[in-house]
Amino acid sequence: METKKYSLNDLIKIIWKNIIVIIVFAVIGGSGFFILAKRKQSTTYTAERSMMISHSLDSKRAHSQVSADLAMIPTYEDLIKSRQVTESTWKALPKSIRKETSPKSISDNIDTNNRPESLVITVKATTKDANQSLAIANTTVEVAKKELPKMQKGLGTVHVYTKANRKAVTSQTHGSVKKYTLVGVALGIVAGMLVSFTITTLRHMN
Amino acid sequence: MLKIKEILRAPINGQQLYLGVLVFYLFFSFLRNTTFDPYLGSRPFNLASYICVALLIFKIYFLDDYKLKGKILITFFLLIAVCSWRLSTSNLIIVMAAFIMAAKDVSFTRIIQCYFYTTLILLVSVVTFSLLGVIKDLVFVVHGRATRYALGIVYPTDLASHVLYLLLAHVYLYYNKLNWRYYTGYVLIALLLKFITDARLSIICILLILPVVWTAKLAENPQSKVAHFITSLYWIFIPVLAFISFAGTYFFDNTNHIYYKIDHLLSGRLSYGLMSMYRYHFTMLGQKVEENGLGGSKGLSVFHHGNVGYFYIDSSYLRLIMIYGLLVTIIILGLMITISVRSVVGRNYAITAILLIVTLSCFVEQHLLELSYNPFLLALLANPRIISEVNINWKRKSIV
């Protein structure tokens, strides 16, 4: 009795005979991953509002003022995300939103953006609900306008720009269902090939 | 339907259980090192590993024929593996230990056949899917070096390692038929690999298959004393390379010109190895080592940021010592030496030749304990005499 050696031709024959097994596994894999991806899928909404902290450009020391303001921006960003501001923000939110959030969740949800050499600070709020994001972004900027002068002496004027409205809110969907399903099908095909190969060899062995 | 009932009613055959568990484990273990891994995560892999270990322990204690002394010895080694697993938080050691211990009365040729076709199917599928775009094909570009493609595997060097071990399995399966046609095929594959992955050290190992195996085949002729002498010395590389791996790193001195050149040839393995010795002390049974490799999407981003934060222990021997402990290192080295010497004594030179290439390769890469790369440690208890064993199994229908 010889040990059975397989040639490429044999492998092709095995695949054809067991193609049904492979298809079954591919379908199971694809649908399994599809369900997984659908469950993992989430949409988030981002609202943003801009503000600027600067001194008047009229004075003789305008140039050095602007440099000083630019240098302070990382500090301002930290202050906006600090507890003093987020707690006041939370208190200023409408009751319905206050029920679903906490000062800590607000500091997790907001993010500040700033371009190099620009004095404009953009406050972005990202949550699972568009109205929440809207309220948080707008309120944070309002509260910052009130709180920041208390936190830093000699702060310039805090200019706040237009409130974000519902139309300006952007949404991002996380998790690509198509990709996951494709991967599921691919894994199913591989698993099917291995299972059919194993069954065929074990049958030959016994 | 009838087939399924038939399968459910058939008595459990130890060898079939072993091979089935092997295929099952190889599926998860192989995919772990591909860009499929982000979709699966570590939980399915760990779960599969523990299921496999449980099934293999069932085979050892309930299906295998051991006298009390044998069972105690096996339990002792498994306990050491368990300790090392808990301390290093890496389940590779317990899986490898379970597979090695459970391999009694399983035909080694069947194991290698299983490994070869399973890994081949997996590798071809992964490469195909990466070229089709279903999963990512990671590309590593360095100035002054060729572009390296990982083709679905997590790192180009790992791709080269897969091919190397597949070739070694092929060498074992077709050992008696090897001639210049096969050797040319191996060289062609090595050249193709150079274009795709530029993994110099693995390709050198593939090219070394030729002289090593050729000498071993010469040794089969009882008249060639020189070939027999050389082949019977193959096992020496195991402790020597392990020692060089350790001592070379321990005494590494960046200011020494020769040392610096060698380190450069080995892509910095010595200096990173020394770093690991500074960060971690030596243990008997292992410890947790935090590593940041260059594999996967995470590794690619480390790579793109000038390798900042890169830390990895590349030499399998150094990994054994630092991660799994001194005791485990001594046991594994002893295991390898036993396999190598025993096969020379039994005039089965294939295993000792293959083990030499494995030893050389493991000097520079980390796959000694990973079954999806290296199945050759399973030769310890597995049965190398295939034909008669398969016949006996077949006649007996089952071992239970």
Image (cartoon, coloured by chain):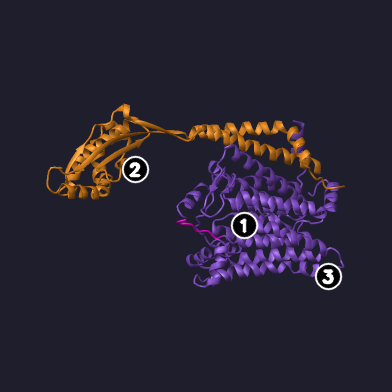
Q: Nearer the viewer, mark 1 or mark 3?
A: 1
Q: Tell me the chain of label 2.
A: A
* Secondary structure of residue under mark 2: helix
> For chain B, what colour was chosen?
purple
Q: Nearer the viewer, residue B145 or A116?
A: B145
Asked if the residues shown at circle 2 and circle 1 are in contact, with their CB atoms under 8 angstroms apart, the answer is no
Residue picked out by circle 1: B200
Residue picked out by circle 2: A108
Q: Nearer the viewer, residue A175 or A57?
A: A57
Report the span colored magenta: B307-313
Q: Tell me the chain of label 3.
A: B
- The amino acid on which the numbered mark 1 sits, given as a three-letter code, is Arg
Which residue is outermost to the left?
A59
Residue B285 sits above or below residue B11 on the image: below
Q: Nearer the viewer, residue A80 or B252?
A: B252
- The amino acid on which the numbered mark 3 sits, given as a three-letter code, is Lys
